[in-house]
Image (tube, rainbow, N blue to C red):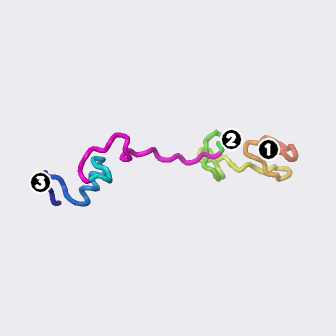
Amino acid sequence: MARDKGGKKKGKRARLEALVRGTIREDANRDVPAPIGSAQQQAPPPQAPAGAPCPKCNTPNPPGTKFCGNCGNNLLGQSCPSCKTPNPPGTKFCGNCGTKMG
């Protein structure tokens, strides 16, 4: 690797390494410390949107998930054993005929 008079690396690779270290900004042509609070600091990763919590274990699951990722509970609800009407998760009695849900 070629070096300048001060012993520093020259070229695109050296500039890229300096950018990664945070010693220069993209718009600067020389090595200077990046200001505190600059774009060099990483923002926290975005959180995945949480869907409705599981009615059994209360774990949040991503929207559109059919089964809980923690306990495996059916998140789409269940059909009534008597009249086959779909009921929301956590329902204890059928909203259509009143049969106890299993």
> Which mark is on residue 5?
3
Region in magenta: 29-51
> Which residue in the protein does label 1 denote?
101
Query: Mark 1 belongs to which amino acid?
Result: Met
Instruction: Assign a secondary structure to mark 1.
Output: loop
Q: Amino acid at mark 2?
A: Pro
87 relative position to 57: left or right: right
**Rendering coords of residue 78 (x, y %):** 75, 49
* Percent coordinates x, y for residue 58 in the rendering: 64, 39
Front residue of 41 and 56: 41
Q: Is residue 6 left or right of residue 54?
A: left
Camera-side mark, 3 or 2: 3
Residue placed at 40% from the left, 46% from the top?
42
The overriding secondary structure of the stretch rendered in magenta is: loop
49 in magenta: yes
Looking at the picture, how far across and down is residue 80, in whole percent? 81, 49
| Amino acid type of the residue tagged 3 in the rendering | Lys
Mark 1 or 3, closer to the camera? 3
Q: Pointer 2: what residue?
A: 55
Residue at (28, 52) in percent of width and height: 28
Left or right: 66 in relation to 47: right
